[in-house]
Image (cartoon, rainbow, N blue to C red):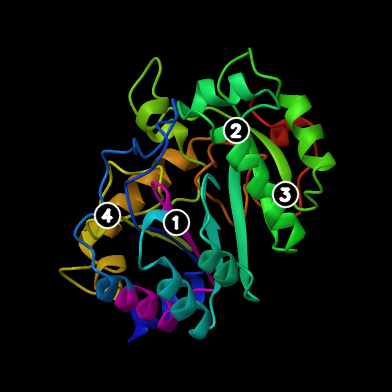
Protein backbone atom coordinates (compact mmCIF):
# COMPACT_ATOMS: atom_id res chain seq x y z
CA UNK A 1 0.00 0.00 0.00
CA UNK A 2 2.85 2.35 0.87
CA UNK A 3 4.51 1.76 -2.48
CA UNK A 4 1.27 2.53 -4.30
CA UNK A 5 0.81 5.77 -2.39
CA UNK A 6 4.38 6.76 -3.27
CA UNK A 7 3.68 6.12 -6.96
CA UNK A 8 0.48 8.16 -6.75
CA UNK A 9 2.58 11.08 -5.51
CA UNK A 10 5.06 11.01 -8.39
CA UNK A 11 3.76 9.21 -11.51
CA UNK A 12 2.44 12.07 -13.64
CA UNK A 13 3.00 11.20 -17.31
CA UNK A 14 2.95 8.13 -19.58
CA UNK A 15 3.76 7.43 -23.20
CA UNK A 16 1.43 4.84 -24.74
CA UNK A 17 3.14 3.49 -27.86
CA UNK A 18 0.11 1.82 -29.39
CA UNK A 19 1.72 0.76 -32.66
CA UNK A 20 4.97 0.33 -34.51
CA UNK A 21 3.25 0.86 -37.86
CA UNK A 22 3.68 4.11 -39.81
CA UNK A 23 3.05 5.31 -43.36
CA UNK A 24 6.48 6.96 -43.35
CA UNK A 25 10.01 5.65 -42.91
CA UNK A 26 11.72 8.70 -41.44
CA UNK A 27 15.50 8.53 -41.47
CA UNK A 28 15.81 9.47 -37.79
CA UNK A 29 12.87 7.52 -36.28
CA UNK A 30 13.69 6.71 -32.65
CA UNK A 31 11.22 3.78 -32.73
CA UNK A 32 12.47 2.33 -36.04
CA UNK A 33 8.84 2.23 -37.20
CA UNK A 34 7.49 2.08 -40.75
CA UNK A 35 4.97 0.44 -43.10
CA UNK A 36 6.14 -3.04 -42.08
CA UNK A 37 5.50 -2.37 -38.38
CA UNK A 38 2.61 -3.84 -36.40
CA UNK A 39 0.26 -3.01 -33.54
CA UNK A 40 1.97 -5.65 -31.44
CA UNK A 41 0.16 -8.01 -29.08
CA UNK A 42 -1.48 -5.40 -26.85
CA UNK A 43 -5.25 -5.53 -27.36
CA UNK A 44 -7.65 -2.63 -26.91
CA UNK A 45 -8.65 -4.23 -23.61
CA UNK A 46 -5.01 -4.33 -22.52
CA UNK A 47 -4.67 -0.62 -23.27
CA UNK A 48 -7.91 0.13 -21.39
CA UNK A 49 -6.52 -1.68 -18.35
CA UNK A 50 -3.23 0.19 -18.57
CA UNK A 51 -5.03 3.53 -18.79
CA UNK A 52 -7.13 2.58 -15.76
CA UNK A 53 -4.03 1.68 -13.76
CA UNK A 54 -2.32 4.92 -14.74
CA UNK A 55 -5.37 6.96 -13.73
CA UNK A 56 -5.57 5.10 -10.41
CA UNK A 57 -1.92 5.94 -9.79
CA UNK A 58 -2.57 9.65 -10.22
CA UNK A 59 -1.15 10.08 -13.72
CA UNK A 60 -2.21 13.44 -15.14
CA UNK A 61 -1.35 13.09 -18.84
CA UNK A 62 -0.87 10.38 -21.45
CA UNK A 63 0.65 10.75 -24.89
CA UNK A 64 -0.39 8.33 -27.64
CA UNK A 65 2.58 7.66 -29.89
CA UNK A 66 3.86 5.12 -32.40
CA UNK A 67 4.66 4.48 -35.12
CA UNK A 68 1.70 6.49 -36.21
CA UNK A 69 -1.08 6.22 -33.59
CA UNK A 70 -3.84 7.29 -36.01
CA UNK A 71 -3.36 3.95 -37.81
CA UNK A 72 -4.64 2.07 -34.76
CA UNK A 73 -8.38 1.45 -35.04
CA UNK A 74 -8.84 1.62 -31.29
CA UNK A 75 -7.30 5.08 -30.93
CA UNK A 76 -10.65 6.96 -30.72
CA UNK A 77 -12.02 4.72 -27.98
CA UNK A 78 -8.71 4.86 -26.08
CA UNK A 79 -8.71 8.66 -26.21
CA UNK A 80 -12.31 8.77 -24.99
CA UNK A 81 -11.49 6.36 -22.19
CA UNK A 82 -8.45 8.36 -21.07
CA UNK A 83 -10.48 11.58 -21.07
CA UNK A 84 -13.28 9.91 -19.14
CA UNK A 85 -10.71 8.86 -16.52
CA UNK A 86 -9.70 12.50 -16.12
CA UNK A 87 -6.44 12.37 -18.07
CA UNK A 88 -5.15 15.04 -20.42
CA UNK A 89 -4.39 13.49 -23.81
CA UNK A 90 -1.79 14.36 -26.39
CA UNK A 91 -1.55 12.54 -29.71
CA UNK A 92 1.88 12.61 -31.31
CA UNK A 93 1.06 12.18 -35.00
CA UNK A 94 2.73 12.78 -38.36
CA UNK A 95 -0.56 14.36 -39.55
CA UNK A 96 -0.22 12.64 -42.91
CA UNK A 97 -3.84 11.44 -42.79
CA UNK A 98 -6.61 12.26 -40.33
CA UNK A 99 -10.02 10.71 -40.97
CA UNK A 100 -13.08 12.97 -40.46
CA UNK A 101 -14.16 10.95 -37.41
CA UNK A 102 -10.74 11.45 -35.82
CA UNK A 103 -10.98 15.20 -36.23
CA UNK A 104 -14.11 15.03 -34.09
CA UNK A 105 -12.20 13.12 -31.41
CA UNK A 106 -9.25 15.51 -31.56
CA UNK A 107 -11.66 18.42 -31.09
CA UNK A 108 -12.72 17.21 -27.64
CA UNK A 109 -11.68 19.33 -24.70
CA UNK A 110 -8.58 17.89 -23.09
CA UNK A 111 -7.00 16.68 -26.33
CA UNK A 112 -3.95 18.26 -27.91
CA UNK A 113 -1.74 17.34 -30.84
CA UNK A 114 1.99 17.30 -31.48
CA UNK A 115 3.83 16.69 -34.72
CA UNK A 116 7.25 16.85 -36.33
CA UNK A 117 8.21 19.02 -39.29
CA UNK A 118 11.44 19.14 -41.24
CA UNK A 119 11.52 22.02 -43.72
CA UNK A 120 9.41 24.55 -45.59
CA UNK A 121 10.70 22.88 -48.75
CA UNK A 122 8.78 19.79 -49.90
CA UNK A 123 11.83 17.97 -51.24
CA UNK A 124 13.78 18.51 -48.03
CA UNK A 125 10.85 17.43 -45.87
CA UNK A 126 10.32 14.26 -47.89
CA UNK A 127 14.04 13.51 -47.94
CA UNK A 128 13.56 12.93 -44.21
CA UNK A 129 10.14 11.23 -44.21
CA UNK A 130 10.76 9.12 -47.35
CA UNK A 131 7.07 9.59 -48.06
CA UNK A 132 6.04 11.13 -51.37
CA UNK A 133 3.38 13.78 -50.85
CA UNK A 134 3.86 13.78 -47.06
CA UNK A 135 4.86 17.44 -46.97
CA UNK A 136 1.61 18.76 -48.45
CA UNK A 137 -0.54 16.39 -46.44
CA UNK A 138 1.11 17.24 -43.16
CA UNK A 139 1.03 20.97 -43.89
CA UNK A 140 -2.65 20.91 -44.85
CA UNK A 141 -3.56 19.02 -41.68
CA UNK A 142 -1.58 21.50 -39.59
CA UNK A 143 -3.76 24.19 -41.17
CA UNK A 144 -6.88 22.14 -40.39
CA UNK A 145 -5.87 21.68 -36.75
CA UNK A 146 -5.34 25.44 -36.48
CA UNK A 147 -8.72 26.08 -38.14
CA UNK A 148 -10.38 23.82 -35.58
CA UNK A 149 -8.54 25.55 -32.70
CA UNK A 150 -7.01 22.25 -31.57
CA UNK A 151 -3.94 22.88 -29.38
CA UNK A 152 -0.90 21.98 -31.45
CA UNK A 153 2.83 22.07 -30.89
CA UNK A 154 5.45 21.32 -33.49
CA UNK A 155 9.05 20.16 -33.26
CA UNK A 156 11.20 21.08 -36.25
CA UNK A 157 13.78 18.29 -36.21
CA UNK A 158 17.22 19.08 -37.57
CA UNK A 159 18.74 15.89 -38.96
CA UNK A 160 21.52 17.56 -40.97
CA UNK A 161 22.95 20.92 -41.90
CA UNK A 162 21.10 21.03 -45.22
CA UNK A 163 17.55 21.77 -43.97
CA UNK A 164 15.70 25.10 -44.03
CA UNK A 165 15.01 24.88 -40.31
CA UNK A 166 14.52 28.53 -39.40
CA UNK A 167 12.39 29.02 -42.51
CA UNK A 168 10.22 26.09 -41.41
CA UNK A 169 9.63 27.73 -38.04
CA UNK A 170 8.65 30.98 -39.76
CA UNK A 171 6.32 29.13 -42.12
CA UNK A 172 4.57 27.38 -39.25
CA UNK A 173 3.97 30.72 -37.56
CA UNK A 174 2.60 32.07 -40.82
CA UNK A 175 0.25 29.07 -40.98
CA UNK A 176 -1.18 30.15 -37.65
CA UNK A 177 0.45 27.67 -35.26
CA UNK A 178 0.09 29.47 -31.98
CA UNK A 179 1.46 26.75 -29.72
CA UNK A 180 5.04 25.73 -29.20
CA UNK A 181 7.22 25.64 -32.29
CA UNK A 182 10.68 24.48 -31.34
CA UNK A 183 13.83 23.21 -33.02
CA UNK A 184 15.30 19.92 -31.89
CA UNK A 185 18.26 17.83 -32.94
CA UNK A 186 18.69 14.27 -34.12
CA UNK A 187 18.69 11.63 -31.34
CA UNK A 188 20.91 8.58 -31.70
CA UNK A 189 18.19 6.03 -30.98
CA UNK A 190 16.52 3.67 -33.46
CA UNK A 191 17.25 4.76 -37.04
CA UNK A 192 18.78 7.94 -35.62
CA UNK A 193 21.94 6.05 -34.63
CA UNK A 194 24.89 7.43 -36.59
CA UNK A 195 28.25 6.91 -34.87
CA UNK A 196 27.38 4.85 -31.80
CA UNK A 197 24.67 2.62 -30.42
CA UNK A 198 21.95 3.92 -28.09
CA UNK A 199 23.35 4.70 -24.67
CA UNK A 200 22.59 6.59 -21.50
CA UNK A 201 24.09 9.74 -23.00
CA UNK A 202 20.95 10.15 -25.16
CA UNK A 203 18.68 10.31 -22.11
CA UNK A 204 17.54 13.58 -20.54
CA UNK A 205 18.19 12.61 -16.94
CA UNK A 206 14.61 12.08 -15.75
CA UNK A 207 13.84 8.61 -17.12
CA UNK A 208 11.41 6.81 -14.84
CA UNK A 209 11.07 9.85 -12.60
CA UNK A 210 7.36 10.59 -12.72
CA UNK A 211 6.98 9.03 -16.16
CA UNK A 212 6.76 5.64 -17.80
CA UNK A 213 6.39 4.23 -21.31
CA UNK A 214 4.37 1.21 -22.45
CA UNK A 215 5.19 -0.54 -25.74
CA UNK A 216 2.99 -2.39 -28.28
CA UNK A 217 4.14 -5.71 -26.80
CA UNK A 218 3.35 -4.56 -23.26
CA UNK A 219 6.95 -3.86 -22.29
CA UNK A 220 7.47 -1.04 -19.82
CA UNK A 221 10.42 1.34 -20.20
CA UNK A 222 11.55 4.26 -18.02
CA UNK A 223 11.02 6.40 -21.14
CA UNK A 224 10.57 5.96 -24.90
CA UNK A 225 14.28 6.55 -25.48
CA UNK A 226 15.46 3.91 -22.98
CA UNK A 227 14.02 1.11 -25.08
CA UNK A 228 16.88 -1.25 -24.32
CA UNK A 229 16.01 -1.12 -20.58
CA UNK A 230 12.67 -2.96 -20.17
CA UNK A 231 11.58 -3.27 -16.56
CA UNK A 232 8.49 -5.49 -16.97
CA UNK A 233 5.41 -6.20 -19.05
CA UNK A 234 1.85 -5.03 -18.31
CA UNK A 235 0.42 -8.20 -19.85
CA UNK A 236 2.14 -10.21 -17.13
CA UNK A 237 1.89 -8.04 -14.02
CA UNK A 238 0.38 -4.79 -12.79
CA UNK A 239 2.04 -1.42 -13.24
CA UNK A 240 2.35 -1.09 -9.47
CA UNK A 241 4.26 -4.36 -9.25
CA UNK A 242 6.46 -3.38 -12.20
CA UNK A 243 7.29 0.09 -10.95
CA UNK A 244 8.08 -1.12 -7.44
CA UNK A 245 9.73 -4.35 -8.55
CA UNK A 246 13.41 -5.37 -8.51
CA UNK A 247 14.06 -4.74 -12.22
CA UNK A 248 12.80 -1.18 -11.96
CA UNK A 249 14.75 -0.60 -8.77
CA UNK A 250 17.95 -1.91 -10.35
CA UNK A 251 17.44 0.15 -13.51
CA UNK A 252 16.62 3.27 -11.49
CA UNK A 253 19.86 2.80 -9.56
CA UNK A 254 21.89 2.52 -12.77
CA UNK A 255 20.22 5.63 -14.20
CA UNK A 256 20.67 7.60 -10.98
CA UNK A 257 24.39 6.77 -10.91
CA UNK A 258 24.78 7.89 -14.53
CA UNK A 259 22.78 11.10 -14.13
CA UNK A 260 24.57 12.04 -10.88
CA UNK A 261 27.84 12.26 -12.81
CA UNK A 262 26.49 14.98 -15.07
CA UNK A 263 26.79 18.72 -14.40
CA UNK A 264 23.79 20.09 -12.55
CA UNK A 265 21.24 21.26 -15.11
CA UNK A 266 18.33 23.11 -13.47
CA UNK A 267 16.28 23.29 -16.65
CA UNK A 268 15.56 19.63 -17.39
CA UNK A 269 11.96 19.59 -18.68
CA UNK A 270 9.19 18.57 -16.32
CA UNK A 271 7.29 16.78 -19.12
CA UNK A 272 9.01 15.27 -22.09
CA UNK A 273 7.90 13.75 -25.36
CA UNK A 274 9.61 11.45 -27.86
CA UNK A 275 11.69 14.29 -29.23
CA UNK A 276 13.43 14.91 -25.91
CA UNK A 277 16.99 14.14 -25.08
CA UNK A 278 19.87 15.62 -23.09
CA UNK A 279 19.87 19.14 -21.69
CA UNK A 280 16.98 21.54 -22.12
CA UNK A 281 15.51 20.06 -25.28
CA UNK A 282 13.63 22.74 -27.20
CA UNK A 283 10.95 20.26 -28.21
CA UNK A 284 10.01 19.61 -24.58
CA UNK A 285 7.59 21.55 -22.48
CA UNK A 286 10.11 23.25 -20.14
CA UNK A 287 9.89 23.59 -16.40
CA UNK A 288 9.80 27.37 -16.74
CA UNK A 289 13.22 27.95 -15.22
CA UNK A 290 15.38 27.97 -18.37
CA UNK A 291 17.47 30.73 -19.84
CA UNK A 292 19.04 30.61 -23.32
CA UNK A 293 22.61 30.63 -22.00
CA UNK A 294 24.94 28.39 -20.05
CA UNK A 295 23.80 24.90 -19.15
CA UNK A 296 20.34 25.58 -20.51
CA UNK A 297 21.48 26.25 -24.05
CA UNK A 298 19.88 23.78 -26.49
CA UNK A 299 22.32 21.23 -27.83
CA UNK A 300 22.00 21.36 -31.61
CA UNK A 301 24.02 19.29 -34.07
**Split into 4 quadrants, where in the image is the C terminus?**
top right
Disc 1, disc 2: CB below 8 Å? no
- Find residue 74 and report its horizontal and vertical position in percent: 36, 68
- Find residue 246 and report its horizontal and vertical position in percent: 21, 61
Q: Residues within 10 Å of mark 3 (few under 14, many from 20)?
A: some
Q: Is residue 64 magenta-colored?
A: yes
Name the residue rendered at 82%, 33% in the picture: 170
| C-alpha separation, residue under disc 1 versus residue under disc 4 | 11 Å
Part of the protein shown in magenta? 48-70
| C-alpha separation, residue under disc 1 versus residue under disc 3 | 18 Å
Whichever of labels 4 and 2 marks the residue nearer the N terminus, that label is: 4
- Find residue 158 and report its horizontal and vertical position in percent: 61, 25
Residue linked to disc 3: 143
Residue linked to disc 2: 135
Q: Nearer the viewer, mark 4 or mark 3?
A: 3
Q: Secondary structure at mark 2?
A: helix
Residue linked to disc 1: 70
**Split into 4 quadrants, where in the image is the N terminus?**
bottom left
Q: Residues within 10 Å of mark 1 (few under 14, many from 20)?
A: many
> Which residue lies most toward the right here?
174
Disc 1, disc 3: CB below 8 Å? no
Q: Secondary structure at mark 1?
A: helix
Whichever of labels 4 and 3 marks the residue nearer the N terminus, that label is: 4
Name the residue rendered at 59%, 26% in the picture: 125
Counting labels gives: 4
Residue linked to disc 4: 39
Amino acid sequence: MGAQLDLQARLTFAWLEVTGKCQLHCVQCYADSGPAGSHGVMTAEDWHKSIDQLADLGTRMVQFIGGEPTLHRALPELIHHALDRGLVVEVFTNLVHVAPALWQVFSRSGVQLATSYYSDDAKQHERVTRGRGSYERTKSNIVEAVRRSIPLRVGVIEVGGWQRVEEAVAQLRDLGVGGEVRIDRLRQVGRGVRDRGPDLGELCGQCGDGRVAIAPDGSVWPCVFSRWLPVGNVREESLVDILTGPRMMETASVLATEFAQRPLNPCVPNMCDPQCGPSCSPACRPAGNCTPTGACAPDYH
